[in-house]
Image (cartoon, coloured by chain):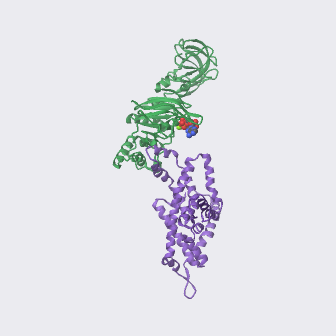
Amino acid sequence: MAVPRSSKAVFWIFLAPVLCWLLLLIVLPHLDLLRMSFAGENELGDMTWTLQNYRNFFTEPIYWNTFLRTAVFSIITTFITFLLAMPVAFYIVKVVRPRLQGAMMLMLLLPFWVSELVRIYGWMILLRESGVINHFLVKFGLIDRPIEMLYNDATMIMGLVYTSMLFMVVPLISVMESLDDSLIEAAYDLGSSKSVIWFKIILPHCKPGITSGSIVVFMLVLGNYLTPNLMGGKNSLWFTEQIYNQFIASFNWNQGAAFGFLLLLLSSLIIWIGLKLSRQKLGEVAS
Amino acid sequence: MDNDLSVLNLVKKFGDFSAVDQVTFDVPQGSFFSILGPSGCGKTTLLRMVAGFEEPTSGSIQIRGRDMAGVAPNQRPVNLVFQHLALFPMMNVAENIAFGLKRRKVDSATIKKQTEEILERVGLPGYGQQRINQLSGGQKQRVAIARCLVLEPLVLLLDEPLGALDLKLREQMKVELKKLQAKVGTTFVYITHDQSEALVMSDRIAVMNKGRYEQIGTPQELYGKPLTPFVAQFVGDNNVWSGEVVEQSGKNIVMKTDEGFVFRTVIQGSIAVGQHADLYLRPETIRIQPADKEALNCFNVTVKTILFDGANSRLLTVTPQEHELLVALPQNRSFDHIKPGQDIEVGWHPDAAICFRAEG
Ligand SMILES: Nc1ncnc2c1ncn2[C@@H]1O[C@H](COP(=O)(O)OP(=O)(O)OP(=O)(O)O)[C@@H](O)[C@H]1O
Ligand SMILES: [Mg+2]
């Protein structure tokens, strides 16, 4: 069908802000960062093109160890978030009475009305050595001395899972709403056990939601700075911290830019592998 | 034991509302049993209790003599064809059919063989690799039935499986389902709100209204000898009059209708002079221009239109008081001269009508 000229104009008018936004805030800064990541100084202090920034990453074990650690922990966090979000979403969509559904969604959203920083400090008040939980444990005689619950990997992962939960639950809820109850009942009627229903009916149906939720959560966790630093402490060794250090502490913008690009490549690569493994296409997931 | 399914005093309450109320019936082995009732009368609820998805409030369900209380749906020897079929869209036809067999840990060679056999039997040979969304409505229908039949259930429960199909296909599937049932010999319990489906397919029909059973019988019995006004109205077409009894001797009464006709007829149950009665008269029991007027209740009507439908043609007529009356039009061409607007005399035999005492 031929599109009339005027509607074509309207199309461009509406698209223009989006294109401007993409260009000004995403493409241009990244192009500049890309340029910076390949820039360096020669012995005379003049600017030259070099691969040194990228080479540093591979020659310094601390860098790529941090990198690997960040990737592995992000995947673990994403998986744990998924494991927790699945029953939550199922409960909200299929078990709770419709009237309560809205209230439950609101309860999920509520923590996100305060900033991440405040939420993390909330956790720290609970968990630190002189914190609320330790206070009660000591008071009831369950432990003799307060224990430090902050600044370890488990606490950090818990904090990351907590921060990402909503971004997994919401896409899962929306795919689960489209799952016809009678499919579950039909599987049950044909002799399935509960676990078969989960693995053969519910999970395959929710696959697009699982994938899009996982991508969002994975990206957020990988690029998170606050939670690993505050809850994981100095030895959290999160890659964003390295980037921050390069930019702010060492003032080495070229190195920082290279790390930034490596992080971008890494996250894209892992998502690509994830999509390949689950035999899905990005377009299908996004729609 | 020759009943595949026995239901005794089954009750299901949702809060104060009784969706199914004191229902009792037996389904003999190998028969086609229908439950017929208007929308919302509790048919699905009843079937879901048999399949195990709803817990009865009271009463018992037995399948081949085994009580089903506390038996989970995946352990019951019955399978349900859902109202909207509920085929698994993430699997192809063969995987849908193999689903139940896999749960029984049948080996894959047998699964393949049985899947092909059942597809053959429902008339879809070679459709195994098709996706569900590539099938037509009637084909989906048959896959849904095949998926259950391949498990060889003692009883196959079908919840209005033709509801979603268009009229033409429904007519066709009606006959096919009946043939399929005769071929496989499985006991079918079939739910419908469409009386013609039930009449065509069933060996026995239970008519249900507001959670209760009105009557159970063969299609002929329900059509010819309805026991309640509801059955008389719901099964087949009927003309209805209400009026007052003016004379009574035993079962024979004389009734004066609200518009002033005086009819001789026979009452079901008992009635006294002065009480009100409702009279139901099938279109095919009314004779046009009868020769022997003595034995009949005769009166004049005006032809409004001719509802031509082949062998099932009728006249829509009105009495002088504008009471509409359907009259069957025999297709032996002897009444070809009848035209809209014409006055004709009609008559019916006192035994042909069904008359009940009016309620309330
Ligand atoms: N879970 C439930 N909670 C409360 N009421 C229910 C529930 N399920 C069914 N009902 C009520 O029970 C009655 C019977 O429902 P049912 O689904 O059995 O009707 P049906 O005869 O199958 O109707 P249809 O022909 O429209 O499918 C309805 O009035 C319905 O509102
Ligand atoms: Mg129903």
Q: Can residue A151 be seen in this view?
A: yes
Name the outermost residue toward the bottom.
A44
Looking at the image, residue A144 lies above or below residue B95: below
On screen, A161 above or below B149? below
Give how far across and how far down residue B134 sits, in percent. Answer: 46, 48
Vertical arrangement, residue A131 with respect to residue A49, above or below: above
Report the front residue among A139 and A19. A139
| Shade representing chain B | green
Hey, which quadrant is residue B145 in on the image? top left
Of the chain colours in the picture, the one used for chain A is purple
Q: Can residue A31 be seen in this view?
A: no
- For the C terminus of chain A, which image quadrant? bottom right
Q: Nearer the viewer, residue A31 or A198?
A: A198
Q: Residue at x 47, y 44 (%)?
A: A186
Q: Quarter-wise, where is residue B19 in the image?
A: top right
Residue B185 in percent (x, y) is at 38, 34
Please report the residue visible at 58 percent of the width from the left and 55 percent of the height from the top.
Answer: A170
The relative height of residue B58 versus residue A69 in the rendered view (above or below) is: above
Q: From the viewer's side, name the closer residue of A274 and A116.
A: A116
Q: Quadrant of the N terminus of chain A?
A: bottom right
Looking at the image, which is closer to me, A184 or B125? A184
